[in-house]
Amino acid sequence: MDLLYMFQGIGTLFAQEPNIVIGRIVLMFFGMALVFLGSKHILEPLVMIPMGFGMAAINAGMLFIDANTVGNIIINPLVTETNSLISILQINVFQPIYTFAFSNNLIACIVFMGVGVLCDVGYVMKYPFTCMLIALFAELGTIATYPVAIAMGLPPAHAAAASIVGGADGPLVLFSSLMLAPELFVPIAVIAYLYLSLCYGGYPYIIRLLIPKQYRGIKIKVTAKSTDVTSQEKLIFSVIACTILCLLLPAAAPLMLSFFLGVAIRESGVTAYMNMIESTFLYAATFFLGLMLGVLCDANTILNPVILPLLILGVVALGLSAIGGIIGGYFIYIINNKNFNPTIGVAGVSCVPSTAKIAQHEVTAVKRATIILQYAMGANICGVMTSAILTGIYITVIPMIGK
C-alpha cells in the first residue's frame, strides 16, 4: 500500500513545487499562531480563531483530486462555469456558504447592518463638523494609495480595490473588490482582514510617535451643556441620509441600506430585531467570515506573484489613514483654539469601535481623567460613512476610466 497516497495530506507535499510546499507549511503554523493570539485577545478573537483554524486546515487537507490535480474538498473559490459549480456544490463542504453568501456581498451587508445596530449616530449629530472633518482626513490612505498603486503598474480597477483597504472597513473591502476586481477578491479580502487585525497593533505606536504626551492628555473643555439627541432625531437622520446617499451613489446602495437600517432599528427600539441582528446575524456572519477567510488562504493563492504589490499597498494604505486622521486631529486642535485632543484623529479610521478604543486607551495611559470616547466614536461612525461614500465613488468612476 502506498502510504503517501493513503495519507494524502502528506503525499501532496511531495507532489507540489517546493515554494508551494514551504508556503503550505508556513501557513499551517501561521494559522495555529492566529488561533493562539486570538484566544489571548491579542488579535480579534471573533475573526482570528475561525480564520486560523481554516487556514491550517485548508493547507493541511490537500489531496489528489485526479492524476494531475491537487486540491481540497473544503472550498474552490475560483470556479465560475455553471456545470462545474453544480458538481462542486455537491462535494466541497463549505462551497454553498461561500457561493451563496460570501461571494455576492451578502455577508458584507449583514455585517454592515450589525454595525448600524451597534452605532449611536447621536455622537455624529452632536459634533458633525468635527467628526466629519476628521473622517475626511482619515481617508488619506484610501485616496493617496490609488496613485501609488497606478505607479506600481496596477490597472485602475485593481488599484482602487487595493486602496479601499485604507478605509479599514472589512465589509467595504469585500464589497468593492467584488465590484471592481473579482479576480482579486480572494487575496484582497484575506490581506485586508489580516491587516485590519495585525496593523491595529501598530496604531498605538503611530500615536505615540506623532503625538507627544502633553497633547495626548488634553482634556476637552465643554463651554456649554449640549442637549442629547433624541431617538426620533436619529431616526429621521438615518432615513434621510440613507435616501440621499443612495440617490447620489447607487453603486453603494446595498451598504447604505444595511447600515442605516441597522441604525433605524436601534433607534426605533425594536428589541426583537436588535437581538436577532446583533446576537444571531452579526455573530454568525462574523464567524463564517473568519472561517471563509481562513479556508481561502490556500498557499497556491497566497503565493501568487500578484499578491506582493497588494501586501505593500495594504500597509501603505492603513498607515497613511492613521497619519491622515492624526493630521485632522491637529487641524481641529488649531482651529478650536487648542481645546481638542489630536489623539481623536486616529478614530476617524473607520473600524468600529476598535480605533476609538485605541484612541481612548492611549489617552487614558497618559491621564486617566481624560475621556474622549464620545468624540472618538463620533469620528469612528463618520469614518464608516465617508468610507462607504468613497467606495461608492470608486465603484462608479473607475469603470468609466477603464480596467
Image: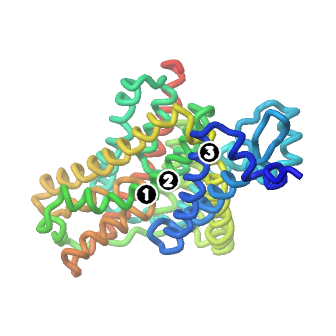
> Among all residues in the image, which is located at the extreme front?
1
Mark drawn on residue 21:
3
Q: Callout 3, which amino acid?
A: Val
Q: In this view, does 403 lie above or below 354?
A: above
Disc 2 on helix, strand or loop? helix
Q: Is residue 182 left or right of residue 209?
A: right
Provide the secondary structure element on which disc 1 rests: helix
Does dot 3 land on a helix, a strand or a loop? helix
Q: Quadrant of the C terminus?
A: top right
Q: Which residue lies furthest to the bottom in this view?
A: 369
Q: Is residue 359 left or right of residue 251?
A: left
Q: Which residue is drawn at 21% across and 49% down?
A: 327
Tell me the crowding category of disc 1: few under 14, some 14 to 19, or many 20 or more residues within 10 angstroms, Cα based: some
What is the x, y in percent for residue 244? 50, 42
For this view, does 90 lie left or right of residue 348? right
Q: What residue type is labelled 2?
A: Leu
User: Would you say residue 362 is visible in this rendering?
Assistant: yes
Amino acid type assigned to the residue bearing label 1 in the image = Leu
- The quadrant holding residue 274 is bottom right
Q: Separation of disc 3 and disc 1 at Cα?
A: 25 Å
Please name the residue that numbered disc 2 is placed on: 194
Is label 2 in contact with label 1 (beta carbons under 8 Å)?
yes
Q: Name the residue under label 1.
A: 198
Tell me how far mark 2 sits from mark 3, CA to CA: 22 Å
Q: What label does residue 177 carry, if any?
A: none
